[in-house]
Image (cartoon, rainbow, N blue to C red):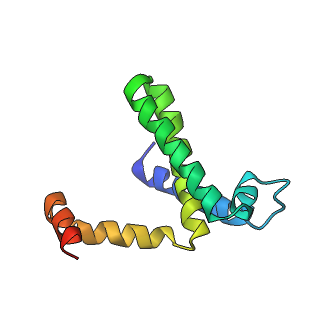
Amino acid sequence: MADENRLEVLAALIAELESRRKVSPKKSYTAKLLGQGRHKVAKKLGEEGVELALAIVDGDKKHVTAEAADVLYHFLVALMARKVPVSAVMEELERRFAMSGLEEKAARKAS
C-alpha cells in the first residue's frame, strides 16, 4: 500500500471517529468513551500505552502492531476529548523538523 493510501486510511479513521462521537453511546464505543469524560479517555490511553510498551518488550510483531493500532485510536479520541485537531499536532511536528531532536528538547526545557 502506498503512503498516500495510508494517509487516506488515517483521514478516514478520523472522519469516522468524528461521526461516531455524535451517535448514541449504546451504539458507539467512541461516543461512550467520550461521554465518560477526559479522565476516562486519558486513563484508557495510558492503559493502551502500557500494553504497547509491554508488547514491544515481549510480544511478536503482530501483537505490537495490534497494540499500536489501539494506542493510535485512543490517542485520536484523546485529542477529540480536548478539541485538539490532528492538524495542530501535525503543525507542531512540522515546526520541529526545523531543528534536531536534541535542540528541540533543549528548547522545551528552556521555556
Q: Residue at x 74, y 63 (%)?
A: 35
Q: Is residue 60 above or below residue 71?
A: above
Instruction: Locate the C terminus by quadrant.
Output: bottom left
Q: Residue at x 59, y 67 (%)?
A: 80
Residue 82 visible (yes or no): yes
Of residues 103 and 96, the one nearer the viewer is: 103
Q: Residue at x 67, y 59 (%)?
A: 16
Q: Residue at x 67, y 66 (%)?
A: 18
State the image coordinates of residue 4 (x, y, percent, origin top left): 44, 54
Of residues 25 and 44, the one nearer the viewer is: 44
Residue 12 visible (yes or no): no
84 on left or right of 2 = right
39 on left or right of 86 = right
Q: Residue furthest bottom?
A: 111
Q: Is residue 73 above or below residue 56?
A: below
Q: Is residue 21 above or below residue 26?
A: below
Quadrant location of residue 31?
bottom right
